[in-house]
Structure formats: structure tokens, C-alpha cells
Image: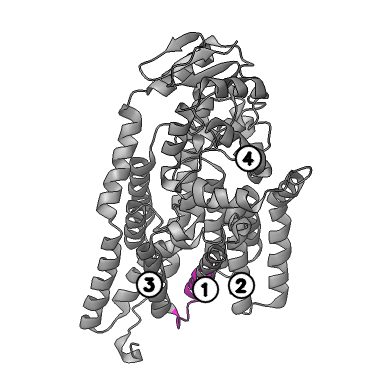
Amino acid sequence: MLTDEEIQTPPKISEESPKSFWLCFALLFLAVVLFHGKSVPFSNEFLYLLRLEPNFLPNDWTFSSPANEHWLFNLIFSFPARLFSLETLGWTGRIVAWMWSLFALLKLGGRWEISVWKIAAAIFLWLAFAQSVVGDEWIFGGFEAKTIAYICLLFALVEFSKRRIITPSILLGLSFGFHPAVGLWAILAVGLVLLFEKIPTIDFVKVVIITSLFSLFGLIPLFAEQTGVSASSFDDWKFIVVYRVPWHLDLFQFSKSGTALIFVMLGFNCFAVWKSENFALRFLLKFQIALGAFFLLGLLLRWFEIFPLLRLMPMRLFPVFTPLFFIFTAFYFVPRLASKRHKIIVSLFVLLVVASLNPFGKSFNQARESVRTWTTAPDDFQTTSRWIAENTPPNSVVIQPPHRRDFWYFSKRASVVSFAYPTYNRLGEWRARIADLTDNRQISKGETANEEIETAYNQLSGEQIEVLKNKYAATHLVSRTVYSYPVIFETETYKVYRLP
């Protein structure tokens, strides 16, 4: 440990000029556009934006199940979805969410008492190495419920670090209302920190009551969803954790070096600010420690194979907040070291940690992916799906490759099931439908699940297709495989069959 003589406390950074603040804001916004300006829709937006359309595909099995975990988001943004195209809504939502998130992060970085240029540099590096080290979590990306939840959470952290109570409690509750998996662990972490800081009892009671009240926007729909829901089995949740979303839920498939590195960052943050007299820094450090404890809880749940509880995602926030706070802390701590030798050693350590996250390579890949979405022509599946939208009855039910998440968006037709979009209130039936379309093929590992499902789907026999047609009242079939049914459209890769 460094002695008191080896640490100096420089004067508090003066307020930055508005010009510097907004210049940094503009530069960071350009970086976000470069890294995440994919064409709309992209990734999850193929599913979540369609939920905003009123009465979308009423005859589709998946869309007949309400997405109550995103109820507040769907309710609010279903109104503009009646007036504007999903592409317009997606772009508008992205831009507004990006701007508010950047504004909140710049304000949050100011709690470390560093210049706005250092704050911007920290945020840029964090964006460059894709925001999280493990867990594939992000704040900047597409437009969906969690982007709004994170805006609420970031501003709540800013306000709590200023010892305010009412406004941040409302925002904290709303973070749960918009996305329970984000808000739950943030609420618990903030509660633990406030208990540890021993704030006045009346203030703590206010936080609990106000946060609970605004959490009801997310809590009531979740309870309502349980009415008449068939219980999911242990194997159902194991399938979700290990094969469907292992990058989010299966800590055994997380990078071991990445996991260790996050805790190294947390250790550095503790070393740098543990004895700080600055309430904001103590609050934000203990917030990270609580998130780290929840991450370890997730590891224990995985170790003992308690798969149903892993759906709560206790490890979600730690990998995305700690790396950013690590860089903020480095910019705060290094100038306060009196010894030039210690400044050099700590700076080299920080540079080594950041370099190990490969910000240059990852930033290039993110930008290249953004360009690719604008320059790549539609593939054969998308061409086929568009043809279906224009040439089949609206009430058609299509047997289609279940691993493709873009079918609904391009075809505007019902399908049997989607591997990309589990119906969490009917997991047993969802798995049964996936099994029907893959001849009950057992997936070997989550990272190759899509390829294995596609292979199994294309190996279905004509007799199996006939069974599926009758079981699910299907009217059309999309496949690479040759069958005896009438072909009504084909590309180089796919054929569309009419099922008599």
C-alpha cells in the first residue's frame, strides 16, 4: 500500500466550459454511430421492434404470447409505431437513447473529478473494446427496452452519488419497470450501498417506498404473466442457459481470463479509492463491489446447476460497469500519486490491462460490421421471405428454418417457432416445437447451435414434413431440401413449397 506521503491530492478540477463538454459529446456520438450504426433492424431489433406493432401476426404462436418482461417499453413505443415505420422508429429511438446515455455517462464520469476530455477518452476506450469484457452485455446498440432502462439507471447513479433521494429512487424503479433483469440487480446493489453508508433511516425508507412504487410498472405485468402459465422444467432452463443464450447466462462458457481481468479491475478500483473522503467515489465503488458479489452468486448458481435462478441474470451488470469505472478511476488516481516512479508503474499497469482488451481490433471489427450491414445485398433467405410477404395469403403459416430471426420482419407471416425468440412463459412447448423442426436433434454446444439446427432442419424427411404440416396447420414450407410438394418460388439456395 502507498503511504500518505506518496499520494497527493491535487486541486479539484474546475468546471469545464460548455464548449468542451459538447465537443466531447459530439465526438463520442460519432464514435457510437461508427460502432453501432447498423441498418435498422439489426440483431434483437428484428424481434423487439415487431412487438411494437399493434396486433402483429395474431395467428402466430410466438406472438400470441405477450412479452410482459418489456411491457412498459412496448406500451409507450407502440403509440409512435402506429404513426411511423419501424425503421424510422428504430433510428429515432437509437439516436435519442444514444444521446441521453452519453450525456448521463459524461455526467457520471464527472463524479471522479477529472476533466471532460479524460472522461471522453475513458468512454471511447470502453466503446472501443465493446463495452463489456464477458457476458456480451451492452448499453449502446440497438433500440430496445434495456437501452431505456440503462438511461434511467445511469442518471439514478449520478443523482444518488450527489446524496439525492427522490429523483434517483424514481429512476431506479423505472429501470426495473423498463427491464427487470437490469433494474433488479441495480436496485439491490444501491440498497446495499446505502445500508453500508448508513444514510438516515427516513431517507432509506423513502428510497425503498419510491423505488418499489415505480418498479410496479415491471412487477405487475410479470405477475400477470404467470396466470395460466405452464411450469417450466429444470431441463427447459438448462437448455436456455447452456444452449440458447450461453453468452449471457452460462458462466462456465465465459472467458476465464476475461472474468479474472474484471476482478483485477475491481481490485484496482478498491485500492485507488477505498479510503476516499469523496462520497460519490465511495458510493460508486461499493456499487461495483455489490455487482461483483452478484456475479459470484451467478457463478455459484452455475456451479450447483441451479439453472432456473440463472434466468434472473445476477451477473449482468458487473462486466459492463466495472471496465468503464476502471478507466475513470485510473485517470483520477494516477495524477494524485506524488512519486513519479509510482505514476509510471500504475500507468503501465493500466495500459497493459486496457491493451489486453484489444480496443483497436474490436473497434475495427465493430465499424466494419456497421459498414457491412449497409453494403451487403439481401441474402437468399431474405429474398425468399420478401416474396412470401407479397405472394401468400396474410393468414399463411410457414414452416421455415427456426434459427433465422429475420423471417417475421421480411415475410410478415406466421411461423411454427423461432429458436431466436424463446417464449419464456411456455418453454416446454417452445422446446417441443424446436424438437419437431429438428428431428429432436441434441445441440452439442451453444456457440454452434444455429448451424446444428439448420443442418437438422434441412435433413427432415418428406414424411416428417407431412406430420408437421398437419400438426401445425402449415400452408407453406421454406427449405433448401428437395421435396415432392409444388415449388412456387425458388432462389439459388431456398425453395418455397405450397403444402396442399
Instruction: Give above or below for 60 relative to 273.
Output: above
Residue depicted at 75% across the width and 49% down the height: 223
Q: Secondary structure at mark 1?
A: helix
| Mark 3 or mark 2: whose residue is earlier in sequence | 2
Whether pointer 1 and pointer 2 mark residues with C-beta atoms closer than 8 Å, the reply is yes
Q: Secondary structure at mark 3?
A: helix
| Mark 3 or mark 1: whose residue is earlier in sequence | 3
Residue type (three-letter) at the residue carrying disc 2:
Leu
| Mark 1 or mark 4: whose residue is earlier in sequence | 1
Indicate the quadrant containing the C terminus: top left, top right, bottom left or bottom right: top right
| Mark 4 or mark 3: whose residue is earlier in sequence | 3
Observer-side mark, 4 or 3, equals: 4
Seen from the viewer's position, the closer of residues 13 and 172 is 172
Q: Which residues are magenta?
A: 274-291
Seen from the viewer's position, the closer of residues 109 and 153 is 153
Residue type (three-letter) at the residue carrying disc 1:
Lys
Q: Is residue 324 left or right of residue 499?
A: left
Around disc 3, counting alpha carbons within 10 Å, would you say few (fewer than 14), some (14 to 19), or many (20 or more)?
some
Residue 300 visible within the image: yes
Main SS of the magenta part reads helix
Q: Secondary structure at mark 2?
A: helix
Seen from the viewer's position, the closer of residues 308 and 335 is 308
Observer-side mark, 4 or 2, equals: 4
Q: Which label belongs to residue 192?
A: 2
The quadrant where residue 72 appears:
top right
Q: Which label belongs to residue 286?
A: 1
Residue labelled with disc 3: 264
Residue labelled with disc 4: 423
Residue type (three-letter) at the residue carrying disc 4:
Thr
Rounded to the nearest angstrom, the CA distance separating label 4 from label 3 is: 37 Å
Residue 14 visible within the image: no
